[in-house]
Amino acid sequence: MARAARSGSRADTALVSTCALLALLATVLPHPIRDAIASNLRRTVVAPLLALQERAERARTAFAERGAVAARIDSLALRNAELGQLADENARLRGLLSLGRQLQWGFVPAEALHGQGIGDEHVLVLTMGERAGVRPRSAVVAPDGLVGQVTTVDPGTSLAILWTHPDFRASAMAADGTVFGIVRPHVGDDAERSLLELRGVAFRNALKPGTLITTSGLGGVFPRGIPIGFVLSEVKTSEAWSRTYLMRPAVYPPDVSNVMILSPQRVSGGTLDEVWGNVARADSAARRAAAAGDSLALLRAAADAHRQRQMDSLRAVLGVPAAPDSAAPDSARGPGAAGGARTTGVDSARRSATPARRDSAVRRP
């Protein structure tokens, strides 16, 4: 054991001495020789250690950036959610602008605030009041149809009941004016509390599912032509001389954030049969225009890419080297520059190929 220990210590001493001697020798060598030796050592002996150091550095960097990457992902998710909300708000505001253009006069735009207390789910607080011309019993409408009715007016604000309120009633008719009745909120299970009822329809009149129901203008509260909802199905009741229909509302209260309050002069000024039809057509036209613009942009990009591939194939066939900016799209270069580059390349290819064809024609017997 003692001999083995002494031999081990001698070997360690010899190794240390050899390393010290090599280090001293490396300090006095010229720089080119030292660089060559270091390069050889990095490629051979020290290569595994360098690989371990690289992996450790990558792991340390990834661990350090983990929090930053998670924060960026959370920011992107939040931004995506905000973009969806902004798109919905933009659609609502666009609908309000279209409704204002169709009404032209006799309305007051207002923001609708939802209450949080018990019983406030049927009431809206409107940010316009008596000073803006709002009067009690004024109709409250949205781009999709009827929202409710103003009940209380203060100088700066007003209160309106929604169509979900138990006291809400509206004289209604089918869109073609052949069937009349009274609309009221439907009292049923939780799944049916967001529906309406059309009562008092004459038994001889039958409505098909999907029929649009609008205000009839009778009673002097709501002008004729405001959409209320769509017929879903008939409800069996004990009334023998009338029919009752279940309706899907045109406007859902949780979606209401901005409304229009109609003035009494606008109510008595005539029917609104064409207003909401024009609003729907204008919104559809705007959506089609936006979709057409996106489609045109995609088609133009595809055409530019196809044209670039054709020019690259032609250059490859003729043996003409590609221009330095051939990888850039035509939109990045000017129209004249792009067209000039393509014309110059083709013309040079034709000029280079024409003498060869003439020489071959002369050499033929």
Image: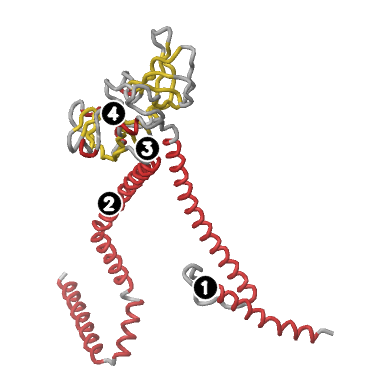
Precedes in sequence: disc 2 or disc 1: 2
Q: Secondary structure at mark 4?
A: strand
Q: Position of residue 222 (x, y in %)?
A: 34, 27
Q: Assess whether mark 2 and mark 3 are in contact (beta carbons under 8 angstroms).
A: no
Q: Residues within 10 Å of mark 4 (few under 14, many from 20)?
A: many
Precedes in sequence: disc 3 or disc 2: 2
Q: Which residue is mark 3?
A: 143
Mark 3 or 2: in front is 3
Q: Residue at x 20, y 80 (%)?
A: 16
Q: Residue at x 50, y 51 (%)?
A: 292
Q: CA distance from mark 2 to mark 1?
A: 39 Å
Q: Quadrant of the N terminus?
A: bottom left
- Residue 74 is labelled as 2
Q: Assess whether mark 1 and mark 4 are in contact (beta carbons under 8 angstroms).
A: no
Precedes in sequence: disc 4 or disc 1: 4
- Residue 288 is labelled as none
Mark 2 is on which residue type?
Asp
Q: Quadrant of residue 173?
A: top left
Q: CA distance from mark 3 to mark 2?
A: 35 Å
Mark 1 is on which residue type?
Ser
Q: Which residue is mark 1?
A: 326
Q: Which residue is mark 4?
A: 149
Q: CA distance from mark 3 to mark 1?
A: 51 Å
Q: Secondary structure at mark 3?
A: loop
Q: Residue at x 56, y 61 (%)?
A: 303
Mark 3 is on which residue type?
Pro
Precedes in sequence: disc 2 or disc 4: 2
Left of 162 or right of it: where is 307? Answer: right
Precedes in sequence: disc 3 or disc 1: 3
Q: Residues within 10 Å of mark 3 (few under 14, many from 20)?
A: many
Which is nearer the eye, 19 or 192? 192
